[in-house]
Image (tube, grey):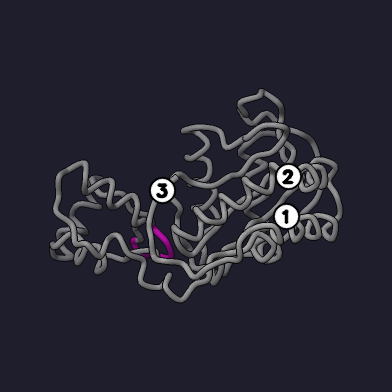
Amino acid sequence: MQLGVRDVAKLLNVNEKTVYRWVQQGNLPAYRVSNHYRFNRAELLEWATSRRINVSVDIFHEPESASITAPGLVDALMAGGVYYRLEGRDKESALKAVVEVMRLPEEVDRNFLLQVLLAREAMASTGIGEGIAIPHVRNPIVLHVPRPMITLCFLEQPIEFGALDNQPVKCLFTMISPTVRAHLFLLSRLAFALRDPGFKDAIQREGSRDQIMNEARRVESNLEPAKPADGGNGAN
């Protein structure tokens, strides 16, 4: 859940004017989306904890997640799409190309999303090795998307990404989720799939959309069925 000013005021037990003042002073982490301030639940909790500010127990719950089924890898890939031969000379231009093709609602600020992804990369590369990266943010930013999605993009040319194995990256899985729990659940499923030889081979040889989806279905069929989200929170 992406929080608004009123939500934050309630969770921190202060009035809305105080929240606006903290934001304007640069103290409280906030994001500008469609001319409104939005706050990440995990970041808000970290911020309040570091300042020893008492918070409502409601901060640990995502009310809307009770009706959301934990996302499946195949469904997320189908929602996000698979794209080939994207241009990119470096990390910034590659991520810009990825954001441009993502299936996002009109109200989502694509430039804002790009800057957040770049900020995450500045902290530590999301390159996981063997030419693969999973761009996302440290604390999932909740955008106005109806369901979790993974956008799989293959670059025209491999680029330097700062991966641990020092290999250039050509394949990017970019994740967007409506809840923190969905993000963490989906990330764990993708990590599991990338350890599967068949799925990883389809990715590394840039298989067709059908081949990739078939491998994802096979991998997912060996996992436990998705369960309703429990509203838990966390940050990766």
User: Predominant secondary structure in magenta?
Assistant: strand
Measured in 3D between alpha carbons, the distance from the residue under mark 2 to the one under mark 3, in whole angstroms, is 25 Å
Q: Which residue is mark 1?
A: 219
Which amino acid, mark 2? Asp
Q: Is residue 167 left or right of residue 186?
A: right
Which disc is residue 196 wearing? Answer: 2
Q: Position of residue 223 (x, y in %)?
A: 64, 58
> Over which residues does the magenta segment extend?
32-37
Judged from the image, the secondary structure of the residue bearing numbered disc 2 is loop
Q: Position of residue 21 (x, y in %)?
A: 18, 55
Q: Nearer the viewer, residue 170 or 90?
A: 170
How far across and down, in percent of the image, does residue 220 sit? 69, 59
SS for callout 1: helix
Q: Quarter of the image holding residue 87?
A: top right
Tell me how far mark 3 sits from mark 1, CA to CA: 25 Å
10 Å crowding of disc 2: few (<14), some (14-19), many (20+): few
CA neighbours of label 3 inside 10 A, class few (<14), some (14 to 19), many (20+): some
Which residue type does callout 3 highlight? Ala
Q: Nearer the viewer, residue 235 or 18?
A: 235
**Type of residue at label 1?**
Val
Q: Are marks 1 and 2 in contact (CB under 8 Å)?
A: yes
Q: Secondary structure at mark 3?
A: loop
Q: Position of residue 176 (x, y in %)?
A: 55, 57
Mark 2 or 3, nearer chain start: 2
Local packing at callout 1 (Cα closer than 10 Å; few below 14, some 14-19, many 20+) is many
